[in-house]
Amino acid sequence: MKMDIDRIAALARIKLKAEEKEKLAADLGNILSYVEKLSSLDTENVPPTSHVLAIENVFRKDVQTPQRIIEEVLAKAPEREGDFFKVPKVVEGS
Amino acid sequence: MSAEYESVIGLEVHVQLKTKSKLFCGCPAEFGAEPNSNTCPVCLGLPGSLPVLNEQAFLYGIQIALALNCRVAGRLKFDRKNYFYPDLPKAYQISQYDQPLSSGGHLLVEMKEGQKKIGITRAHMEEDAGKLLHEGRAGSVVDYNRAGVPLMEIVSEPDIRTPDEAYAYLTALKAVLQYVGVSDCDMEKGSLRCDANVSIRPKGETRLGTKVEIKNLNSFSAVKRALQYEIARQIDAAEKGETIFQETRLWNDERALTLTMRSKEEAHDYRYFPEPDLVPFTVSSDWVEDLREDLPELPAARKERFVKDYGLSEYDASVLIQDKDLGNFFEECVTAGAPPKRASNLIQSELLGMLYERGETFHAMKTTAAGIAGLIRLVENGTISGRSAKDVLADMLETAKPAEDIVREKGLTQVSDETVIAEAAKKVIAANPKPVEDYKNGKEKSFAFLVGQVMRETKGKANPALANKVLKELLG
Ligand SMILES: [Zn+2]
């Protein structure tokens, strides 16, 4: 099973060292070939399963249940500015 | 637009559903709260939290789908759309991929050339992202109050051919959503958002050209202007033999142009997969039919009714129904005793224009439907002339006083006393020998001028029919 480890790393926004890439490629390769076994099954007439539980239509009523946890969360945030989370500058467009 | 090209436009509209709580958690979904105050472990994406679908949002979604003539799926699921962006706390958005809530609908749009049917590819549910703010800061900051707010994404077929059609589609869509009553549809508050996809192709070509996505469209007129600009830009590029790149461009309203969004190095790959934290959903046809029955009267049906019951023209009816509240206001005027056609005329030819000039909406204006009906009654029974009615209406909008009071205070009561009108007519005849002469020589236009002068002489108070009659007699 071939895969582009650089692309996967880029999509996951992680930086990998060369030796990590090698190790991860091998690990992921093993995982994929294990899962590949499934393709040997005949699933022609089996509808796809999107969920392992045999239940459906689980709803909650439209009721407000405010939690007021933001102080606690912001206190643990890497950076804050007042009541905002602060993140590196994101610029759209020019 | 150049004669050799046509544009192909598709619109993606996101509309916020008017629920009390968010789509998957109990946080208040309202606009304008303190930053990050409406957040919880679910919408902040904290480990161990689990989403549970808001039933009301689901029902609203189905109602929107039905109002847009879509087929509601019997079985559907939610999927994770994966991407990294600071406005997305979980690094994925819960959306719908291959089993959307609904698909295959259409919307009828009123154009000058007649009705046009615009297909709706799909309408699905998803959660909103947070809001990033950049202005005047070294970094960016995020407010996650909006994260997890329920949205319907409504995707049109690429059936739209001109910026005007795009505008008409949005107007019609907004009207439907407003009638269903499931959203505020307020672009300023972000409860209605629109992205546009546009490409050009030589006329007669059936293949699609390279499509460009335009974002940052903050009003319907911005959509129209951005499309006009972008179509011209693409045609210009095509004629110069340049390549049109598939890209996302941002509309800059101040500079009136679209600019390339700095493209991320890696191509978009959302790696959709089924959301394991939510179970699948099934919708029985009985359930769908119950919801269909609960739908209120929609714009198209109301327009038909206005034409049939009130004798309005198709055009007048289509203007009045465009805004649910405007349609209601018109009907309240009728209920308060105003003849439908007069009410329609007064609203369309005077009231809306005056409000526009005053920078007001009729929601916030100082007069009521009963007030308008009162004003129309004064014209109907001859107390004031149509011309005075305009002035009285302007005063009503300024002072909130009933028409009767304004007429009394300003002495605008129509003059139906022949001797008074004759007095004025004699003055006009004496002061305008040339038009009088022309009229006697058969120039009908001069007569209209003389009537106008009599109206002016009486400060608009003369009964126009009497002014006509008296002048004719005097000139006879
Ligand atoms: Zn929440």
Image (spheres, coloured by chain):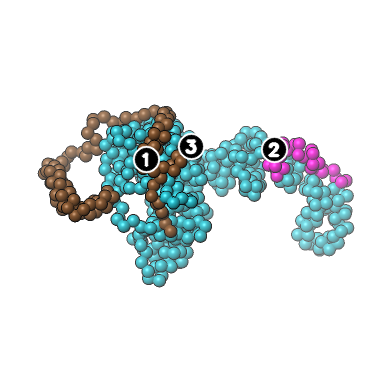
Going by the numbered disc 3, the residue's amino acid type is Ala
Question: In this structure image, what is the colour of chain B?
Answer: cyan
Counting from the top left corner in percent of width and height, residue B110 is at 50, 50
Please state which of residues B53 and B133 is positioned toward the viewer in this rendering: B133
Q: Which residue is mark 3?
A: B33
Q: What subunit carries mark 2? A: B
Would you say B72 lies left or right of A21 here?
right
Counting from the top left corner in percent of width and height, residue A52 is at 22, 33
Residue reaching furthest to the bottom: B240
What is the C-alpha distance between the residues marked 3 and 2? Answer: 33 Å
Q: Earlier in the sequence, mark 3 or mark 2?
A: 3
Which lettered chain is shown in brown?
A
Q: For the C terminus of chain B, give its image quadrant.
A: bottom right
Q: Which residue is mark 1?
A: A77
Going by the numbered disc 2, the residue's amino acid type is Ala
* CA neighbours of label 2 inside 10 A, class few (<14), some (14 to 19), many (20+): some
* Dot label at residue B115: none
Q: Secondary structure at mark 1?
A: loop
Q: Say which residue appears at 65% left-offset and 47% top-offset.
A: B358
Please state which of residues B32 and B9 is positioned toward the viewer in this rendering: B32
